[in-house]
Image: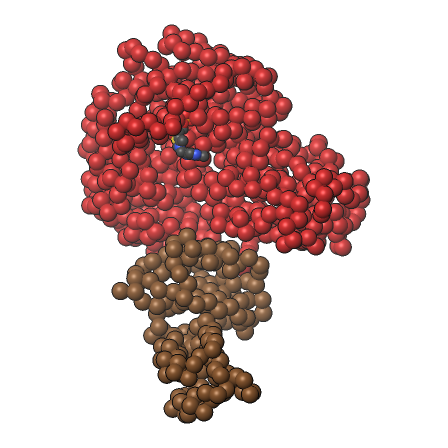
Amino acid sequence: MKNPSSDILTEKEIPATASATPLSGSEAVIRSLLEEGVDTIFGYPGGAIMPVYDALYHYQDQVNHILVRHEQGAAHAAQGYARITGKPGICLATSGPGATNLVTGITDAMMDSTPLVCITGQVFASLLGTDAFQEADVIGITAPVTKWSYQITDADEIPEVFAKAFYIANSGRPGPVLIDITKNAQVALMSKEFRYTKCKHIISYRPRLQPKQEQVELAARLINEAKKPYLFVGHGVLIAKAEEELKAFVEKTEIPAACTLLGLSAISSDHPQYVGMLGMHGNYSTNKLINEADLVIGLGMRFDDRVTGNVAAFATGAKVIHIDIDPSEINKIIPADAPVIGDAKAVLKALLPLVEKRERNDWLAEFKELDKEEYEKVIKEDLFPEGGQIKMGEVIHRLSEKTAGKAAIVADVGQHQMEAARYYRFKQTDGYITSGGSGTMGFALPAAFGAKVGSPEREVVAVIGDGCFQMTLQELGTIWQSELPVKIIILNNNYLGMVRQWQQLFFDRRYSFVELKNPDFITIAKGFGIDGMKITEREELDSALDTLISSKKAFLLEILVEKELNVFPMVPSGAPVSDIRLE
Amino acid sequence: MEKLYTICIFTENTLGLLNRISGIFTRRRINIESLSVSETERKGISRFTIVFKSDEREKVEKIVRQIRKIIEVLAVFGYEDPDLVFNELAFFKLDTKNAAGAKQLLEGYKRAKVLFEDEQILIIEKAGTEEEIYSFFKQLKPYGILEFVRSGRIALSRSEKGLAQYLPEAEWAYNI
Ligand SMILES: Cc1ncc(C[n+]2csc(CCOP(=O)(O)OP(=O)(O)O)c2C)c(N)n1
């Protein structure tokens, strides 16, 4: 293609009637999505995907398309949708830059095991490899960050490839898949009748859901023998929807249970067996006591380095049971004495009759004892400060109370993310949606409206730093246009706070390029038709949160918080978990 | 101590797989010593033979598990040399004026022969292990090697089981 603008002008006519047979490739795409029960697409059009958009035009009554403002937003929104519904999130984008803009979100979804089906347009098959206008090797670019990908060059392939894509995305350990469709395959008519059969089996891909009985028995024996067992609850529990089984398991065994960042809300924060969050900014007791345990049970979690700190000094006195659906996680970081491959729900069900009922009050009391120390040194001041500027912690604490712990908190990345994780008291599952493995700034705003679309009844509150907000703030436009009542809190400290904290603690306070000159966020929100309010004083906090929560429409609340607040406790990067600092 | 490991990967014959497989090595900064891809006795199934060095068997096991995760991969097996029968093929190009000496050298070697000869060049084929080929190379060097090429290793395990016993019915999920 010589003249870039001819891209749109050379559009071929495609049949206008949706019911005409045979179907065009584009229509087959939409019909495939409908067959999979898709109700929402997050997308952004462009030349190479226009035929699909044209087909979509005829199906607006059956699919809700949400026009984002940047394809990264589409990917994150689809993640938010997937995380709250358990269904794959769908993104639609054009070739070249449209596709590459998805990459950050796809990577994020891969890291956090989130099912996405990303559909990208591609240049005509005859032009592949010629550096045609807006051609990019999307399959090549995304290979390392997708669970599976496929390039369709023939309309006839569409139903089968889509069926495969949906099956792969949302089975086993979920993840993002990408389907790249050349333009000729979109415009061509299928040579055969459109028939859709859902995929249930792929010969080369057989995730094990049901654990092997001998693995379960070994695990149960270790649990029954242990004096101080300790359960790490990960994202896998939420993905498997195993919350009930988890509750039954901890209630029978009385094993203290801590959640990873992505495992939060799998068990109620108020549950007597719940001891807090693991990880670099997790709780004091949860970290300290890892090396006191004689048995560690990793359940649907992957011993991320933000959880283990120095691996050599992690769980030194403990045997390890590792329960995961992904065999490649076993022995990857922490050698397992008893690996159990399977779906968290199936494994818990199998374990439950084999584990003995126990009381473990003394062991639990050790956690409570250390909690007191954390309360005195950190929490008290974070939640009930006696002066000074508003703290992030007290905002989250008040928010938690006002929403009765039932909101879905969608947190961005940084100090606010950790404070939200620490201080929100989760009483409903899928209550905390954030970018864990990738730590992608800019995640929260689009993910929040994605979650809201997926769960319109649920109160969805995005908690965002002033830095993160400016990575994807254009998505306010999406929220406005789609009339999504998302509640947004910006915790503004005028810094890239988390980086500043590291500079303070580990780089002798050399604040290298972390101070932000921020725009007037409220004016920006208003420009996008969204009401907002800024507060700076503690006295205003309660009523401002009330306004935010009671608003029927989207609302942005900017809260000026303590500028040089630090998040504690903290395990310094690479240190043993037992070196966790309270100040 | 670094050791050679051979991984045999059985896959469906689809585009882009090599990219996914090599990506796993690249991410872990492992240099592939040799690679060969071929068909198998089964239709639509390809076989990758990848040789690389590692100082720990455990690392190899991790790679094997990572490769198993690729959707189109049917089975992956990792081996150390004693588990295998393996070989490579090498070609050497020499100036024909040195043919006499080179041919004399061939007589002392098994599985080495002249593949092509005209007035200008002589091409010698040598089959053998990497070591055998290397030692042959050293012997031939004085005759002036104009060009040299080695195939990747191909290997079959010494196990009595054939592929049919593994595919498609058998359990190739991770067995621990
Ligand atoms: C895309 C991206 N770039 C850079 C980073 C590194 N990073 C992690 S936290 C952070 C600061 C976030 O600042 P802000 O949104 O103001 O949140 P705060 O920490 O102040 O709560 C940065 C720059 C990142 N995680 N993601």
In this rendered view, identify the residue nearer to me: A96 or B148.
B148
Question: Residue visible at 57% across and 63% down?
Answer: B13
Counting from the top left corner in percent of width and height, residue A128 is at: 65, 53
Horizontal side of residue B152 vs A28, given as left or right: left
Question: Residue visible at 36% across and 67% down?
Answer: B5
In this rendered view, identify the residue nearer to me: A136 or A295.
A136
Counting from the top left corner in percent of width and height, residue A151 is at: 62, 52
In the rendered image, which quarter is residue A270 located in? Answer: top left
Horizontal side of residue A549 vs A529, given as left or right: left
Q: Is residue B71 visible?
A: yes
**Image height of A384 relative to B1, above or below:** above
Question: Residue visible at 49% across and 18% down?
Answer: A519
Question: Residue visible at 21% across and 36% down?
Answer: A579
The hue used for chain B is brown
Quadrant where the N terminus of chain B lies? Answer: bottom left
Quadrant for ligand 1 reads: top left
**Image height of B36 relative to A402, above or below:** below
Looking at the image, how many numbered discs can be counted on the residues?
0
The hue used for chain A is red
Horizontal side of residue A372 vs A156, given as left or right: left
In this rendered view, identify the residue nearer to me: B166 or A557.
A557
Counting from the top left corner in percent of width and height, residue A281 is at: 31, 31
* Name of the residue lying farthest toward the front: B97
Quadrant where the C terminus of chain B lies? Answer: bottom left
Counting from the top left corner in percent of width and height, residue A29 is at: 68, 44
In this rendered view, identify the residue nearer to me: A217 or A118.
A118
Q: Is residue A81 visible?
A: no
**Image height of A54 relative to A394, above or below:** below
